[in-house]
Amino acid sequence: MDNAIFIIAICVLVFTIIGHFGLPFGTKVSIREIDYDSLSQDKQPFFKIQENKEIAVILIHGYAGTPLTMSFLAEELFENGASVFAPLLPGHGEDAEAFSKTRYEHWEKKVKQVFDEIRPLYKKVFLVGFSMGGNLCLKVIEELPTYRQPNGVITISAPMILNGFANGRIFYKDWKLTLSGLIQYVIKFIPKVKESKFSLRLSPWNGYGKHHPLAALHSLKINIRKTRRSLSKIKVPLCIIQIQNDKTVEPENAHFIARKVNSIEKRVFIFPLRENFTSRHRSITHLYSRDRVAHYIKRFIDDVCKQFDAYEMKSASWKSEKNKDEET
């Protein structure tokens, strides 16, 4: 009897571990290049270029979203003097089948590619990511050498923990996520919670609205865990924005990021939304929060740029004095 209980316990443990992490050999998928000509206008990547080459801001949208969700923030930043770039992540903006074939590494590769193209062209470059986009921004800069780092990073409702254990707490969002490593081979799509028309007016959304591809969602769950393991490598100025009563990403995620990074300059803005009609997650489009979010981001970018310019002036002055001393 005891042996039977022990065997059952071992089987349950193995099932749970594989259900959470997936099979050890995984499944490799190849994706085709995005056919931008086939996309509707509201799914297209966009950019707004200033005449000068001073400041560039790269805006990374969230899971299942599109660059359009970043359009309000893009307008605010452009009016504030920055050039803005909002790429479309692979699989997003296309049909559900294309989305189901993409993984976290594909989205990460796209962010790296865009950053590598823009970094040499501008004096100051900032990365701004919403939700999964924030996690991607942190993941990308963790591996960059110091001389190629952005001048600052802004995360908005960035997840570090979905289902799992961290900081002495158990985080449990959805049982399907708990066992997604196995369920993904049986169930291809899981339904998304339907939103009311009023909710969508209050918190606009552009992206997949009916269901989530479980394999892509599992890839996100596993890789955000990898990001949080290396947060200590991050030393650039960081701004963290979070809705206190967000139903999708709990505020503990913001505290976790703030505690783990080694940025000397870091700001954390956490505030509530006083309504009960939405998930209170899409703070970048929500009519009650988007102005406040844009204000925090503009102020952070302005302050970091002033510090950068002051350092450059001081450095130039020091070099000039050194040259004079050498001449004499």
Image: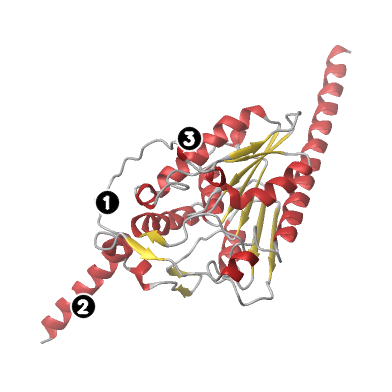
Q: Quadrant of the C terminus?
A: top right
Q: Which mark is residue 164?
A: none
* In the image, residue 223 above or below residue 203: above
In terms of image quadrants, where is residue 80? Answer: top right
Badge 2: residue crowd in 10 Å (few <14, some 14–19, many ≥20): few
Closer to the eye: label 2 or 3:
3
Residue nearest the observer in this picture, 105 or 142: 105
Looking at the image, can residue 179 be seen? yes
| Cα gap from disc 1 to disc 3, whole angstroms | 33 Å
Q: Which residue is mark 3?
A: 37
Closer to the eye: label 1 or 3:
3
- Look at label 3 and name its amino acid: Asp
* In the image, residue 24 above or below residue 165: above
Residue 238, position as x, y percentages in the image: 66, 51
- Look at label 2 and name its amino acid: Ala
Mark 2 or 1 closer to N-term? 2
Residue nearest the observer in this picture, 30 or 188: 188
In the rendered view, does 91 fall on the left or right side of 284?
left
Q: Which residue is mark 2?
A: 9
Mark 3 lies on a secondary structure that is: helix
Q: Which mark is residue 26?
A: 1
